[in-house]
Amino acid sequence: MSIALKGGWVITQNPNRDIIKADILIENNRISQIGEISSADEIIDCTGCAIIPGLINAHTHVSMTLMRGIADDVNLEQFLEKTFKVDASRTHEDIELGTKLGAIEMLRAGNTSFVDMYYSEDAVANAVARTGIRGFLGWVVLDEQFTTQKGSPLKNCENFIDHHAGMDIIHPLVALQGVYVCNEETLLGAKELAYKKDTLLHIHLSETRKEVYDHQASTGMRPADWLYDIDFLCDKLLAAHCAWLTIAEIKKMAEKGVSAAHCPVSNMKLASGFEAPIPEMQEHGISVGLGTDGSSSQNRLDMWGEMKTCALLHKAQRLDATVMNAQRTFDMATIEGAKALNMEKELGSIEIGKIADLAIINLKHPAMVPTFPQNLISNLVYSCQSDCVLHTIVNGNIVMKNGKITTIDEIAIIEAAQEMGKKFHYDE
Ligand SMILES: [Zn+2]
């Protein structure tokens, strides 16, 4: 099976950040040619469009879509109390359904990959396989005394990885809730598992000031300093949030090759951390991707909103309009996100040989006019929105065509999710 994308502007995100007028040939699941393509099994006319690398959502809890709006405008303690209570009542069925809903929302926005952290990731994996989105799925590990999971979380995670290794669009990994529910033994056991299975390792790190102060009170050290000392930090680690780090901690993370997922909307909405030192992390060579976090804190799985918010937040906070420019922000949602997942050889840019995870953006949408190569990246970051996306391709498959999801009955999922959502929104 081959697909030709003809006549569009290609936002390559290659090392030169070239933007070129060219056709793209996809054969099987890879980009095989960029240039002039005359024939293919299927041709998509991309005149008046931009072709971008599919967006990478570097941190979420996708099945929480069904919990949208259950705990807004409350402080973090009340938020956690409400969400933990609801989390404990979830079933395999509603986790799978919530994931399908989230996958549709992301595919509609040209978001082709997401990093997930939850339990029952086998239900999430089922939904990934059905919808055709690419999932980096982290089964969450924590101390047994804090979990509602049946059996050992670490063993559950290992079983999950064993059952889903080697699949095209499912990338299992080891996830950890955070230092507040994971002791040294749990953390190092999880790291060992990630090395044994050669997977990514994902954790929430220094999301709130309380997390840092509590950890200092119990260990005498800040979380990242402590994780360095116990030899947990490593180049498989993707740390979400990183809102409360010192420069000394950033240097230790950089030394160990740790990467990060910045979640500006979630941090602002929960008032949990305004001051994520992202520019400093980048200056020290840390790869930083962008994540939405779950729908109970971000409400939308919307990488367009996340990009714009990221750029505005850092500009406003530092009274410096140059500190987070459009190109740097777009990089975080594409090639830097791929680097953060140790997947830059496969994803994150449009180059020959890479996996065909792509989105095609309508430049005739009112929000995108006028567009020229000179302002294309700016328009993508500051103007573009989900409904500008016409087609989405994951692993060489057209999963959305002309705004219609091809893999699953979208209307049926929306109706079922509306019905299933009742149990989270009405106290029995
Ligand atoms: Zn999270």
Image (spheres, rainbow, N blue to C red):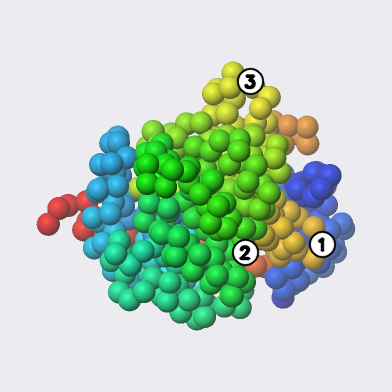
Amino acid on which the number 3 mark rests in the picture: Asp
- Residue to which mark 1 is pinned: 352
Using the image, determine if residue 324 lies above or below residue 155. Answer: above
Q: Is residue 38 visible?
A: yes
Amino acid on which the number 1 mark rests in the picture: Ile
- Residue to which mark 2 is pinned: 394
Sequence-earlier tag: 3 or 1 = 3
- Residue to which mark 3 is pinned: 320
Q: Residue at x 45, y 35 (%)?
A: 273
Q: Quadrant of the N terminus?
A: bottom right
Of helix, strand and loop, which one carries label 3? loop
Q: Residues within 10 Å of mark 3 (few under 14, many from 20)?
A: few
Q: Quadrant of the C terminus?
A: bottom left
Q: Is residue 42 visible?
A: no
State the image quarter where residue 119 is shown.
Answer: bottom left
Seen from the viewer's position, the closer of residues 347 and 304 is 347
Residue sticking out furthest to the left: 428
Q: Residue at x 70, y 70 (%)?
A: 29
Of helix, strand and loop, which one carries label 1? loop
Asked if ligand 1 lies within 8 A of label 3, the reply is: no
Using the image, determine if residue 191 lies above or below residue 18. Answer: below
